Amino acid sequence: MNNFIMRKIIYLNFTILIGSFGLLHANAQSNTLKLSLEEVIRIASEQSPDALMARHRFLSSYWEYRSYLAQFKPKLSLSATIPSLTKSLNSYTLPDGTETFVHQQYTSYTGNLSLSQVIGFSGGNIYIQSGLQRLNNNLDSAGLSSWLSHPITIGLRQPIYNFNAYKWQKRIDPIRYLEASRRYIEDIEQISITATTLFFNLIIAEGQLQISQMNEANYDTLYRIAQGRFNMGTIAENELLQLELNLLKSKADAENARLDVENSEFMLKSYLRLKSQQNLQLIPPASPYQGNVPVSDAIEFALENRATALEFERRILEARRDLDQAKHEGRFQANLSIDYGLSKNGANLSEVYQNLDDMQQLSFGVYVPILDWGQAKGRIKMAQSNHELVKTAIEQERIDFEQEVYLAVMQYNMQNSQLEIAAKSDTIADKSYQVAKARYLIGKISITDLNIAQSEKDLARMNFLRALQRYWNSYYTVRKLTHFDFTKNLPIQVDMNKIIE
């Protein structure tokens, strides 16, 4: 930024400082809280409502990712039934093959300790289990009991040619978590944009108030002078009435401007969650970066760092997953189940862990659809169409994505010259008004010419403040879209561990 704009910002800071003295004089007991744009953004990033919501959205994604990781780790579980009471009349097959009904009344106790592990690449599950069961026959007057133990059982459950959800989770869930991390960075940069907008809204409102107060003071002076001239007969009554009307209008503008300042200050305090009754004094910033941002670099950084770029990849993978699921479901499927272990039953607990018997079980089940009237084929065709639809949509969105970055960078690169033009226009319009005011006082121009000069002065000042706001909004927009700080020439990074703690 050139020296001319820097002088203009220094002058703006000075006028804001002078304007705050009147407020301090009106309420000497209150303190003024001075905040720069950097401090406002820091506070907003720590405690604004948007910051809290962004933090909790990321934490939700973090714990979702932790749950994904946990399912691939061994799980130890204990299950027990203590007790299970049964009293019923059930059918019973006699040795000769005939059926009869007998009364049953017993109490059973069971317990199982199991260690299981998911096999991610195959979609199966392997486990080691130990169990113990006790059965009390309540119809026996002696209250005899029997025991059954399974000291160790090793088992495998393996689907064959079935849809493997674990395989796709390993490809998609890490991308989803990284996408959430990058989305959090973008949320923080969006907070910077929102805080910047509210910061400059207050500065613009204060600038409008200063203009209104200055106009009120000027028109009050001009009206008093005009009254003397009118009494001397040197000006017409309509000119005096025009000045009086300008004075009344400037007073009304000043009242409206005060209300706008209070409202803008309330909005900024509310967003920053500042409960203090202190008045805010904002310090307008200078330019953070001198020079243009290369468009090609910005697009490259955006493709490398943006959450949207990862979203494109994730959506393609999800469409492929759905297609893979459609191809496997409703088609040939098989399941292999293998169990090997040791077991023993007996009347006493000590007996069931001696001279153990082998226990082996093997089963292989298949499912073959013979006639489904095209149901499976229809699901596959729908999944294929959806896959192509997603690819087409992403191709267009990628073009829009790059165009968004291009336009944002071009707009930012234009802001330096726009700000310089606005600063010069403000200076020229202010000098023009001072000349017009002096010429009016000596009767060289009409009140209409003075009003035009005053309107141009006010408009130029507000245009300069708005240009400064657009500059900073563009700056943080480029940061958000690229995840890159062109001031430090470094990517924007956030320590996620501090959020998780």
Image (tube, rainbow, N blue to C red):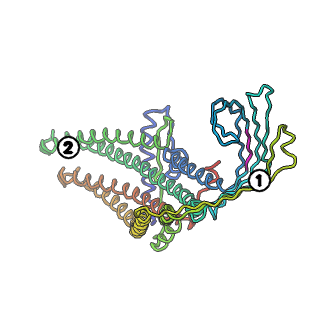
Residue farthest to the front? 96
Please state the horizontal and vertical placement of residue 32, each as a whole percent of the image.
Answer: 50, 39
Using a 10 Å C-alpha cutoff, classify the residue at mark 1 as few (fewer than 14 neighbours), some (14 to 19) or many (20 or more). Answer: some
Label 2, on which residue? 243
Please state the horizontal and vertical placement of residue 420, each as a whole percent of the image.
Answer: 38, 64
Please state the horizontal and vertical placement of residue 18, each as a whole percent of the image.
Answer: 43, 45
Residue 470 covered by magenta stretch:
no
Tell me the residue at 68%/31% (across/down): 104
Rendered position, 231 above or below 73 = above
- The span from disc 2 to disc 1 (Cα, nearest Å) is 108 Å
Instruction: In this rendered view, identify the residue nearer to me: 282 or 397.
Output: 397
Instruction: In this rendered view, identify the residue nearer to me: 81 or 468.
Output: 81
Q: Secondary structure at mark 1?
A: strand
Q: Is residue 471 visible?
A: yes
Label 1, on which residue? 359
Instruction: In this rendered view, identify the residue nearer to me: 461 or 179.
Output: 179
Rendered position, 371 above or below 239 = below
Tell me the residue at 53%/68% (across/down): 304
Please state the horizontal and vertical placement of residue 43, each as a whole percent of the image.
Answer: 53, 47
Would residue 353 appear left or right of 372 to someone viewing this image? right
Q: What residue span does the magenta drawing correspond to?
A: 110-114
